[in-house]
Image (cartoon, rainbow, N blue to C red):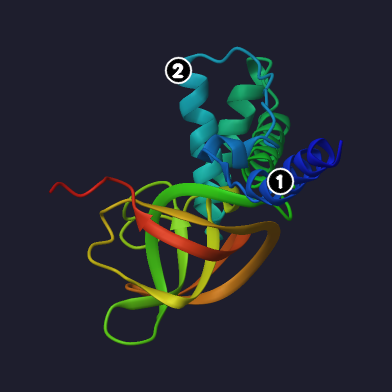
Amino acid sequence: MQKTLSLVLSVLSLTTVSLPTYADKAVALEWQDLNSAAQEVTLEMPDLTDQQMRLLQGVIAMSASKEEQVQQQAVEFKETLKEQGINADEVIALRDEYMQTMKASAEAITTEFDGKKVRVPGFIVPLEFSEGMTATEFLLVPVAGACIHMPPPPANQIVRVSFPEGFQVQNVQYPVWVEGDFSSNKVTEEVYLVDGKSNLTMGYEMNASMIEDYYEKEN
């Protein structure tokens, strides 16, 4: 009986010790997981001919001009469209609303992974270095060159990473795996990039505990 009880206690002890291993296992994410809050946006526009589209584009292009002659031409374009049953101001307002909704949807962030340990693949955009090319603060993005020689992706496709230990950056064109504690935090900051200072909106942040190459090195 004593031997049986000891065996049961031993098994329970092993089970208790092994539980944190499963609890601490990082959740592997893909970039579309961070874009899950985005919604499909539809736009109902009147059927327009190619000529009507060109007239509308002309109205939009001329709307910022202060020259009287240009403004008069915009009025004439609107009158032409009106004769064809198209209200230019209403169509342009619909277009502007659609673009604003699209932008808001594209930047929507998810809180599903807040407080969790995650593992995300991506490309590094260094922000701060300790020594040499050892990055301690950087952005993680899904596309090589984003925020450097290309426009930045939406906020929900940018993770700001803090890694005090530092990671030796060999080439920003090489993907890596980043693992650590994750949280949503949409914020706009002035950051220094290769092309100079820029105001950048980031959707997430991570305190990294490990960074490794995406591809295994060949022996």
Seen from the viewer's position, the closer of residues 99 and 140 is 140
Q: Is residue 108 above or below residue 83?
A: below
Seen from the viewer's position, the closer of residues 26 and 60 is 26
Q: Nearer the viewer, mark 2 or mark 1?
A: 1
**Can you identify the residue that label 1 sits on?**
19
Seen from the viewer's position, the closer of residues 191 and 3 is 3
- Checking the image for residue 4, the label placed there is none
Whether residue 211 is visible, yes or no, is yes
Residue 178 on image: x %, y %: 46, 56
- Checking the image for residue 50, the label placed there is 2
The three-letter amino acid code for the residue at tag 1 is: Leu
Q: Is residue 159 above or below residue 58?
A: below
Say which residue appears at 65% left-offset and 18% top-offset.
83
Seen from the viewer's position, the closer of residues 115 and 149 is 115
Marks 2/1: CA–CA distance: 65 Å
Q: Is residue 40 above or below residue 149?
A: above
Say which residue appears at 69% left-offset and 57% top-offset.
183
Q: Residues within 10 Å of mark 1 (few under 14, many from 20)?
A: few
Residue 17 on image: x %, y %: 70, 51
Q: Residues within 10 Å of mark 2 (few under 14, many from 20)?
A: few
